Image: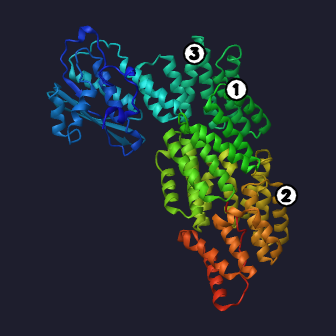
């Protein structure tokens, strides 16, 4: 496989030095030295496929460190790779080493990258005329710094003294070119990998450091704030207004992700003030979009739409597809939250189309597809939701944004679990539980949450409630996640587990955060769970009153859909069949694709006397879904429907101990 294929898409020849990525040009005075050192491509033995870039990038960086020593001559990496391409054996086999030595290298360096605790272990060997005095491996969390340290260590062992370093720009320039291309495509982790090398090589290059901070913020790296603050001082000293504004925007996005909304607003205001007199209009628009995100989070929809219209007009006038796509996504989010599913899907699909072409925007596409999946799920269209969320997971992984990746995985798990695709759900949970996911706040929160949800799904409510205690603690720092979906899960779980005091407290917390829910499709959650709590306590009249209240205040969306299904089931139990069809007509997709809807429709057909249809619907659910997610009550219903068909006699169905849709 060629070098350009391994480390990224090939660039035009004019962007490369004549001899490739490893060819660092030394001053003429050094041109008479014989080349006698060669580094093989590093071996990635971490088990992490995403680190495939280390094989050539780190070998090139090692070459750069060795080449800086005037007493050493280093064989270009491209020549090493070309020699190895003709070999059927992979390095560091004896034959591969001999092939490289045949090019003139007297010493061949072979390095391997291993995982070690939360970082890396760099092991290395010398083959040829030189032996290592100290072969102990290097360990640390930053692979770039480990490689630089290895280069300096080997240089000390390979030469008697270390002459002054010489300027070596070729490798850095190419790495920076690739970093910027990755950033344009929103492959932020890849950009960050290249930029770490650039900053290590040129720690005072302002443009490189700005790009570095932007990529750190995009992946929500914990070093973002400290590096941004240091860089702001340098940018201010150089009077570079655009650099200051870019760093402020990156820092605002980072703090918005951490839910430090007040600080994020202040940073955006500072950046816009800097750009007032004379600034890049596209940068102003990007800052306004950050402000729009904050307005949506604060439920200031009118303000968000006003900002969005302003940015959209500027973006379309300037033919900025990326800004237009982001504006449309925000418009779709607002439409969905307001219960306007059809307009939401229309603009979200338009946004996704713009994010695909002409230049694929991985992070934007992941966010848009995630939102599309939510709209489909809320409408009960589980098949469409599964298709959208699967694609969102792929793009979030490629973008290298850990929070978005964790969110998409968590939603993928629930969608596929409800759709009966247990293998996909298990894979998503395994990824969420991985060590890399546990490094982010969102990863820890969502892995604990989905673990609790899976225990509840399989009937282990007590174990699920124990796990939710940790989720509640983590929710103090992830309020948006907690209020958006975790608190409703915990409330339903508490009612199912007979923890009525806990459920009462959680309902009170939902009501205390009225501003977060009011005017959105989540509004009515408190009334719904009051109905569920009344039902669990046997108060039928109060249950109906609260369900009707829910449907009176809740717009179209997840809460209203679940209330309709719960009401349809209760009406079947009460033999109020004239009302059932009206409830089911409001959620047609749910009765076709979601287990709760299928159960409700089966029960209605049974009460109507259409026992064959009831049996068909219930069997479709029980036989399709994993055995540990089908309750004894659901299996009993299937047996009862079969018995009615066999005997030709109707009989009373035992009442469900809790609302049908207690678990969203």
Camera-side residue of 355 and 220: 355
**Residue located beneath label 1 in the image:** 314
- Relative height, residue 318 to residue 597 (above, below): above
| Mark 2: few/some/many CA within 10 Å (<14, 14-19, 20+) | few
Q: Which of pointers 2 and 3 indicates the residue nearer the eye?
A: 2
Q: Earlier in the sequence, mark 3 or mark 1?
A: 3
> Residue 219 placed where, x, y %?
53, 36
Q: Earlier in the sequence, mark 2 or mark 1?
A: 1
Q: What element carries label 1?
A: helix
Quadrant, the N terminus: top left
Q: Distance between the residues labelled 2 and 1?
A: 40 Å
Q: What element carries label 3?
A: helix
**Residue located beneath label 2 in the image:** 552
**Residue 479 visible in the current orientation:** no
> Residue 517 placed where, x, y %?
77, 48
- Residue at horizontal 34%, vertical 29%? 147
> Residue 513 placed where, x, y %?
77, 47
Label ID, residue 394: none
2 and 3 marks in contact (CB < 8 Å): no
Q: In which quarter of the image is residue 193?
A: top left
Quadrant, the C terminus: bottom right
- Residue at horizontal 72%, vertical 77%? 605
**Residue located beneath label 3 in the image:** 235
The count of marks equals 3
Q: Which of marks 2 and 3 is nearer the N terminus?
A: 3
Q: Quadrant of residue 632?
A: bottom right
The residue lying furthest to the top in this view is: 29
- Residue at horizontal 38%, vertical 17%? 169
| Mark 3: few/some/many CA within 10 Å (<14, 14-19, 20+) | many
């Amino acid at each position: 496989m060629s070098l350009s294929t391994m480390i990224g898409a090939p660039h035009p020849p004019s962007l490369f030095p004549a001899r490739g990525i490893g060819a660092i040009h030394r001053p003429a005075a050094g041109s008479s030295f014989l080349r006698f050192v060669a580094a093989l491509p590093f071996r990635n033995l971490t088990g992490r496929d995403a680190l495939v870039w280390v094989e050539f990038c780190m070998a090139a960086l090692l070459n750069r460190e060795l080449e800086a020593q005037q007493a050493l001559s280093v064989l270009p990496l491209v020549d090493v790779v070309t020699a190895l391409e003709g070999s059927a054996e992979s390095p560091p086999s004896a034959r591969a080493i001999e092939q490289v030595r045949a090019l003139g290298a007297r010493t061949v360096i072979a390095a391997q990258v291993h995982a070690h605790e939360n970082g890396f272990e760099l092991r290395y060997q010398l083959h040829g005329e030189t032996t290592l005095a100290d072969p102990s491996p290097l360990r640390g969390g930053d692979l770039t710094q480990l490689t630089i340290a290895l280069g300096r260590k080997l240089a000390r062992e390979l030469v008697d003294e270390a002459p002054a370093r010489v300027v070596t720009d070729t490798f850095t320039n190419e790495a920076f070119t690739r970093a910027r291309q990755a950033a344009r495509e929103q492959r932020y982790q890849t950009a960050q990998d290249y930029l770490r090398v650039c900053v290590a090589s040129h720690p005072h290059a302002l443009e490189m450091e700005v790009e570095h901070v932007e990529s750190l913020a995009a992946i929500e790296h914990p070093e973002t704030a400290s590096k941004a603050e240091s860089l702001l001082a340098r940018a201010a000293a150089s009077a570079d207004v655009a650099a200051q504004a870019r760093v402020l925007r990156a820092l605002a996005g980072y703090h918005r992700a951490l839910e430090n909304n007040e600080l994020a607003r202040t940073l955006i205001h500072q950046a816009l003030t800097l750009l007032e007199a004379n600034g890049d209009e596209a940068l102003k628009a990007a800052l306004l979009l950050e402000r729009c995100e904050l307005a949506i989070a604060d439920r200031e929809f009118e303000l968000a739409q006003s900002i969005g219209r302003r940015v959209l007009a500027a973006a379309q006038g300037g033919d900025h597809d990326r800004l237009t796509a982001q504006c449309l996504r925000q418009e779709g989010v607002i439409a969905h939250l307001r219960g306007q599913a059809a307009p939401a899907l229309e603009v979200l699909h338009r946004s996704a189309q713009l994010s695909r072409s002409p230049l694929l925007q991985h992070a934007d596409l992941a966010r848009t597809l995630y939102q599309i999946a939510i709209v489909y799920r809320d409408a009960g269209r589980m098949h469409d939701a599964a298709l959208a969320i699967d694609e969102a997971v792929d793009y979030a992984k490629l973008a290298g944004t850990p929070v978005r990746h964790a969110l998409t995985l968590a939603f993928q798990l629930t969608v596929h679990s409800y759709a009966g695709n247990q293998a996909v759900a298990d894979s998503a949970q395994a990824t969420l539980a991985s060590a890399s996911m546990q490094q982010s706040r969102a990863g820890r929160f969502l892995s604990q949450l989905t673990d609790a949800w899976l225990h509840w799904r399989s009937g282990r409510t007590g174990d699920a409630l124990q796990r939710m205690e940790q989720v509640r603690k983590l929710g103090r720092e992830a309020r948006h996640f907690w209020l958006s979906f975790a608190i409703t899960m915990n409330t339903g779980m508490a009612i199912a587990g007979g923890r009525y005091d806990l459920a009462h407290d959680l309902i009170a917390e939902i009501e205390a955060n009225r501003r977060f829910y009011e005017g959105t499709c989540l509004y009515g959650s408190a009334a719904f769970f009051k109905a569920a709590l009344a039902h669990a306590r046997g108060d039928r009249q109060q249950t109906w009153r609260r369900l009707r209240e829910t449907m009176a205040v809740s717009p179209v969306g997840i809460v209203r859909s679940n209330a309709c299904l719960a009401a349809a089931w209760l009406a079947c139990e009460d033999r109020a069949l004239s009302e059932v069809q009206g409830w089911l007509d409001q959620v047609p997709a749910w009765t076709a694709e979601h287990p709760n809807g299928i159960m409700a429709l089966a029960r209605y057909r049974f009460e109507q006397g259409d026992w064959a249809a009831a049996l068909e619907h219930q069997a479709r659910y029980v036989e399709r879904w994993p055995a540990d997610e089908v309750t004894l009550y659901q299996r009993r219903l299937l047996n009862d429907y079969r018995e009615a068909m066999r005997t030709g006699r109707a009989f009373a169905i035992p009442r469900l101990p809790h609302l049908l849709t207690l678990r969203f």
